Amino acid sequence: MEDFQLRPSGGRLYLRPKTVKPCKTCGEPTGRNYISCKECYNTIENLWLMDWNELIAKKDIISGSEDEKLLAEVIVEEIDKYSWTIVDSAMKIIKCKTCGSELGGGDVDCPDCSFAFENLWAYDMDAMNQGNMTGNEHAIRVGRWVIRYPHRQKRIMVESWKFSMPILITGKLPTTQLAQFLKKVFDEDNFDLSNKIYQNFEEAYLDVVSNTKNKRT
């Protein structure tokens, strides 16, 4: 019988935004342009950085140092001992020995990146079952992996996660039915959700239904 593995929680230090607001830099919902806008990037990434900075401070390690890289290598070898934010942060520091990209973020045909990526998700299942990870936290983790490494996913998936992240970072989570509805909107590409600001997924649903209904009448 395997030993019980308690999964530590993560992402609880960062004081998240409570509402979705226009980004002061790019003008779109804050968090949407994670790759291209510094403020959007920080709004999402600080959830990870707060945990990582606390860890290296406790270990008296300087950010950007060789000791930080060595710590990241240890964490990647022992991912079961650490939270999702710490593991993801470590993988950002480590370069894949095969392709040279951030570990897990290389091209889809890189076997080492694919292996590292696939190994991440047992934590989420265990942690959610143990009450140490919320559905919202799981969604944010998935979303960050998609928008940080968009070359690994289909364009429609990337666009749907870019849409979702500003809402998710405020703590909201769509129901399964709403998620399926919005996925269909992106798949069919018949309604532009890209530049609008919604405080929750229900607002987006009502906007789509109202406007597509008006077009039919």
Image (cartoon, rainbow, N blue to C red):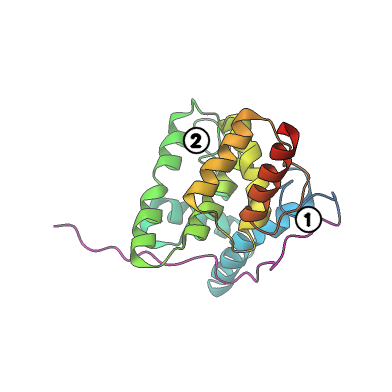
Q: Is residue 31 magenta?
A: no
* Residue interval drawn in magenta: 1-24
Relative to 162, say whether 2 is above or below: below
Q: Amino acid at mark 1?
A: Glu
Q: Earlier in the sequence, mark 1 or mark 2?
A: 1
Neighbor class of circle 2 (other Cα within 10 Å; few <14, some 14-19, many 20+) is few
What residue lies at 55% left-to-right and 54% top-to-bottom? 174
Would you name the residue on which mark 2 appears? 97
Residue 11, given in percent of the width and then of the height, sits at 54, 65
Would you name the residue on which mark 1 appears? 39
Q: Tell me if 141 is positioned left or right of 189 in this view.
A: left
**Majority SS type along the magenta span:** loop
- Inter-mark Cα distance, 1 to 2: 31 Å
Residue 120, given in percent of the width and then of the height, sits at 42, 48
Q: Which secondary structure lies at badge 2?
A: loop
Q: Quadrant of residue 16?
A: bottom right
